[in-house]
Structures are given as C-alpha cells and as structure tokens.
Amino acid sequence: MSRGEFMFDINIDLDDISISSIEREDIVIIQKWINEQNSSNIENEKPLGLKEIYERFLEYYVSESEFFLKIIKDEKLIGVLKGRIEFKTNNEVWFWYFMLDDKLREFGLGSNIIKSVKDYFMNELGIYDFYTGVCEKDLRILKFWNKNKFLISRVSKGYFNINDEELDMIILKNS
C-alpha cells in the first residue's frame, strides 16, 4: 500500500533519529510498543487492540490532512506522533497524540522531536500555528508542552468523561 499523491509523506532526520510516516506493516510493532509503554503507567490504560490501532491508521491513511509518525533510533521504535493539519485562513497543525519511550524522557529528546516536526511544517508548508489538547489532570503532559512554549489558548469545559468525571481539555497554542 502506498500513499496517494495528495497525502503527506513525512521524512525527517534528527541526528541519529528518523521520523517518518507510518506504513501498514508498522502497525503490529506500534501496537505492541504502545502496550509495553502503557503497562508501566500507574493509571494502567487497557491494552490497545490491533483493531483499534488499525482503525487509527486507516483514519490517517485515507485523510489528506492527517499524519501518523513513527520515531526510530538505532532501528528501534522509540515513539509515535499523530496529528492533523487544518487548512484555514491561518493553517494550523494539531498534535493529538505523542508518546516517547519512558526511558528516554526528561533528557530533552521529546522537545527536540517536537521542534524538528514544527520546523518541517514551517519550512515545507509555511505553517506557523501549532496546537495540542491536554486533559486538565495530565499535569506532566501540560508541563512538557508548557516547557516547549505552548501556552493556554482556551479551555473546552467537560470535554472528557473519565470514570463518570467530567474533565476539561486545555487547548495550548504555539506560534
């Protein structure tokens, strides 16, 4: 399966790290990796099924505006990043899902990856507005995005319903 001519085929080299579009043959490896990462999470999410990750892949694959990236170092998967581009008066990139290997966090690597992806969109597509949405309870994730100069743009009240608790989504913007 190869991507259509209007799809984004992203390839970014960052020192010894390769950031590139996910292909169908990557799905099983990504599913296993995400489940390994989540197994060390105290709030242990339920395992991600193959069908669920395949549906996420298809969402990206058939869309002209979504991207789903694998992050590889030394031929080993160390992260994934999923998002979309919104074509408006001021085009925007939304980062919806970013996960980096637990063992590689807190060393600035995640920040370097986000910077490289932002640079790609600025240089290749002239997009300068970047957004992400974070659950109000995800303080560690909020801290990461704040450190990368993503500031609160707005709040969507009651966006999440987790265990019958309504939680806000904080929309962060970097431009």
Image (spheres, rainbow, N blue to C red):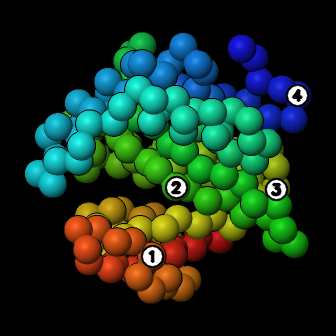
Q: Residues within 10 Å of mark 3 (few under 14, many from 20)?
A: few
Query: Would you place residue 91 above or below residue 32 in this image?
Result: below
Q: Which mark is residue 96?
A: 2
Residue bearing the label numbered 3:
126
Alpha-carbon span between mark 3 and mark 1: 30 Å
Q: Earlier in the sequence, mark 3 or mark 1?
A: 3
- Amino acid on which the number 1 mark rests in the picture: Tyr
| Of the two numbered discs 4 and 3 in the rendering, the one whose residue sits closer to the viewer | 4
Alpha-carbon span between mark 4 and mark 1: 35 Å
* Mark 2 secondary-structure assignment: strand
* Residue 43 falls left or right of residue 48: left
Query: Would you place residue 59 above or below residue 9 in this image?
Result: below
Residue bearing the label numbered 4:
5
- Amino acid on which the number 3 mark rests in the picture: Gly
| Of the two numbered discs 4 and 1 in the rendering, the one whose residue sits closer to the viewer | 1
Quarter-of-image position of residue 35: top left
- Amino acid on which the number 4 mark rests in the picture: Glu
Q: Residues within 10 Å of mark 4 (few under 14, many from 20)?
A: few
